[in-house]
Image (cartoon, rainbow, N blue to C red):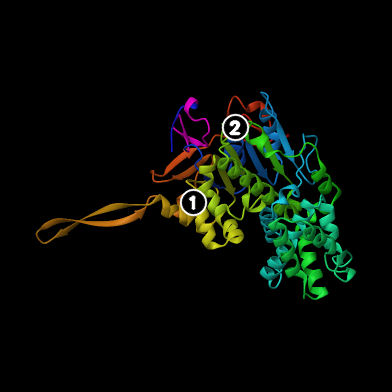
Amino acid sequence: MRTDPVSRRRGRIVIGRIGRRLVAAKRRESVLVFGPPGSGKTSAFAIPNILEWDGPAVVCSVTSEILRTTIGVRSSYGRMAWVYDPTASVGSVLRIGWNPIPQCVDFQKATRLAHHLVSLSDLMSVTQGDFWQSAASDLLGPLLHAAAIGGRNIEDVMGWLSDPRSSRAASANGTQTVAFGTPLAILDGAHEHDDQIAARTLRGATIGTAAETMLSFATTARVALKVFSTRAGIQSTRQQPAIDFDRLLDSSDTLYIVGTEDVQDELRPIFVGLIDALIIRVGERIQQERRADKPLLLLLDEAANSAPLTKLPQYAATLRSRDVQLVTIFQDYGQVVRRWGRDNARSILNNHVARVLLPGMADPDLLEIFSNLVGERQAVSTTISQGTYGPSTSETHRWERLAPVNELRTLPAGHAVLIHDNTLPAKVRLRPYYRQPQWRHLGGWLEPASGRPRRGQL
């Protein structure tokens, strides 16, 4: 944790102020923020840091507030601001497309993408949800790979999944109708080792499987691609320009990944697949000794809903070495437990270097966690009693919380508690962007004479 002047905090995430000094995490240290609605997690944390970041940035959110407030600044001074919005939920912006098929030329990437797409579909309420996810993933991975090496598109994959037995493929006995005949023919006609593995995987997922069961597997895989069944979704795969990870990483441009909450279930797998593909590319560039001049800001707002990265527990610890500044924002700890499970939730909490608690939190588990992290102090109670031979004094030593749960729950508005690595905990003042002279013109929040913020028109 640093309290450095502005000239020495480039590439750092600013948490708030202690007195007049800014408090910032060290470069590329992962930052975890917990804040309920209205706590300032967007206006006093996410937006100010996005506005001040001088390198490339990827911002994922379930609302357009961050986009509308920051896009003007982020697209100035020769920089570009691109919006990936597969459902066309926001107005006139510079949209960019992303086609997941080309990366699937690598079967390992196709398998990884299929896993993300299927595992993040809402199947956990289904009996034996893990079984259906595994089977659908084994089916979808080879299909994505076949589409990539066969020059096909996402619509072809959707078509194969719609009627798996309608395709025809050549066999030793002539032409016969077989399950997924067209993608199998593509894979069989290729000669790379990965192509043959993909063909065997596809056959293993279909041969000996009852038609009704296989159709259920295909339906499950189609659910994972639901966002691409709409006109806007299909258009997003054809949109030009398309996302160029190398160009983004070598620039100071911004990629906004947005979508409305009502279609978040369909968007979530796609967003995770996109961000994961970007992280993979960052790792490939490091192996090629192509490090970017400036670190990448990856800010996940409402991370449990917008882009619940499967590997977030690991990324919180490792992205720093890949020149990625990770900022993860949640409403409460319960979201993390529900999405990743209790063990992984604890890893997410532990692996972020800086943890920030915003005011208004009512999650008892999280309040208890922060109270424990702040620590205890030894208190001394002195008792004076009157005895036969005069007064006597006794001392009682006990341990008490430095920040009891009730004090954390009633944290004043505009303040936050910071737990950073092995330094002492700190109480900081937040920096709402609408109170910063250089950002007041951006709108979104207006400050009336009373000094209390109210919602304004964007």
The quadrant in which the N terminus is found is top left
Picture layout, residue 37 above or below residue 428: below
Q: Is residue 2 magenta?
A: no
Mark number for residue 120?
A: none
Q: Nearer the viewer, residue 18 or 103?
A: 103
Q: Amino acid at mark 2?
A: Gly
Expressed as whole percent of the image width and height from the top left, the position of residue 136 reads 73, 65
The crowd level at tag 2 (other Cα within 10 Å; few <14, some 14-19, many 20+) is many
Expressed as whole percent of the image width and height from the top left, the position of residue 397 reads 26, 56
Q: Nearer the viewer, residue 99 or 325?
A: 99
Asked if residue 122 can be seen in this view, the reply is: no
The crowd level at tag 1 (other Cα within 10 Å; few <14, some 14-19, many 20+) is many
Could you tell me if the residues under marks 1 and 2 are in contact, i.e. CB atoms within 8 Å? no
| Residue under label 1 | 351
Specify the segment rendered in magenta: 7-25
Q: Amino acid at mark 1?
A: Asn
Tell me which label, 1 or 2, sits earlier in the chain.
2
- Dot 1: element: helix
Expressed as whole percent of the image width and height from the top left, the position of residue 357 reads 51, 47
Work out how far the residue at label 1 is from the one at label 2, CA to CA, in angstroms: 24 Å
Q: Is residue 19 magenta?
A: yes
The quadrant in which the C terminus is found is top right
Q: Nearer the viewer, residue 262 or 449?
A: 262
Residue 221 falls left or right of residue 254: right
| Residue under label 2 | 55
